[in-house]
Amino acid sequence: MTKPAYKRVLLKLSGEALMGDDAYGINRATIDRMVADVAEIAKLGVELAIVIGGGNIFRGVAPGAQGMDRATADYMGMLATVMNSLALADAMRQAGMTARVMSAISIEQVVEPYVRPKALQYLEEGKIVIFAAGTGNPFFTTDTAAALRGSEIGAEIVLKATKVDGVYSADPHKDPAATRYSSISFDEAITKRLQVMDATAFALCRDQKLPIKVFSITKPGALKRVIMGEDEGTLVHV
Ligand code: UDP
């Protein structure tokens, strides 16, 4: 059997990826399918850390948050990622995997705090680590948390799971002539003004020479193909 292309990866899942076709919240069948994908790569011996967004829950409360102070709304968004992390860890437990949630905001009765050496220890023990509460700071995103934690744990790559199967030359929903890049450098992505991750996350990955793979989480088998180093999605390289 061929070996995985990576030993340690950071997987960024958007909150929306948990919604399935629902308007907001967590869709049971969707989370179970995602966990099955993760189980497949965990079996290969790849050390896996996950950062999950909160968009799916935040959407449900957004109308009530209108006009709210930005930092307060952002703290609500971070708490939404804690809820998603707990749901994901529980679904993993039910599927027979061991996951640990570590939060950037201290809520010790609910989840343990993020402590880097502890996270590294869990990864070495083969446990899946889920980083909750983003970076712990308002005005940031979970993409930036993925770039930050990915750098901290020495991940070889950030896998950005989206609904689109890579980075395109134009919006594939609007332009039928749009083509997918199989790989592109950070500099080319900037020159061509391609949206890969938010600017802070992108700059951090570029500085740290941490490649990014953009791929579709809704495409069956895509995560495994990415892990095996196959031509799936778009690789953003130095
Ligand atoms: N957030 C934040 N700081 C962080 C990460 C997230 O303030 O370090 C807040 C922010 O309000 C954001 C929300 O949490 O809109 C949910 O995160 P994100 O939008 O990245 O989730 P996704 O779109 O991936 O579901």
Image (cartoon, helix red, strand yellow):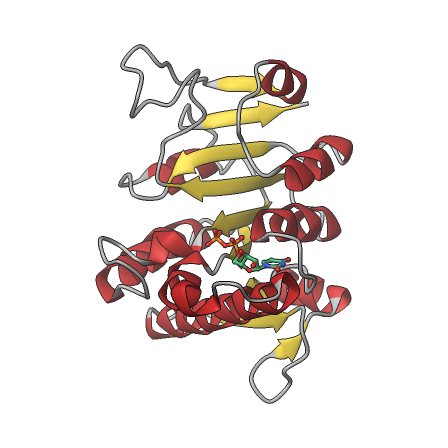
Residue ranking furthest to the front: 67
The quarter of the image that holds ligand 1 is bottom right
Rendered position, 154 above or below 1: below
Comparing 59 with 82, the one in front is 59
Comparing 197 with 123, the one in front is 197
Return the x and y of residue 17 as percentages of the image width and height.
36, 52
The quadrant of the rendering that contains the N terminus is top left
Residue ranking furthest to the top: 177
The quadrant of the rendering that contains the C terminus is top right
Rendered position, 191 above or below 118: above
| Quadrant position of residue 58 | bottom left
Comparing 199 with 186, the one in front is 199
Rendered position, 41 above or below 225: below
* Horizontal arrangement in the rendering, residue 14 relative to residue 22 (left or right): right
Which residue is painted at 30% across and 58% down in the image? Answer: 19
Q: Is residue 1 visible?
A: no
Rendered position, 163 above or below 31: above
* Horizontal arrangement in the rendering, residue 82 relative to residue 21 (left or right): right
Which residue is painted at 59% across and 39% down in the image? Answer: 198
| Quadrant position of residue 120 | bottom right
Which residue is painted at 61% across and 50% down in the image? Answer: 146
Return the x and y of residue 229 as percentages of the image width and height.
48, 30
* Horizontal arrangement in the rendering, residue 65 relative to residue 92 (left or right): right
Q: Is residue 111 visible?
A: yes
* Horizontal arrangement in the rendering, residue 59 relative to residue 125 (left or right): left
Residue ranking furthest to the bottom: 109
Return the x and y of residue 219 as percentages of the image width and height.
28, 38
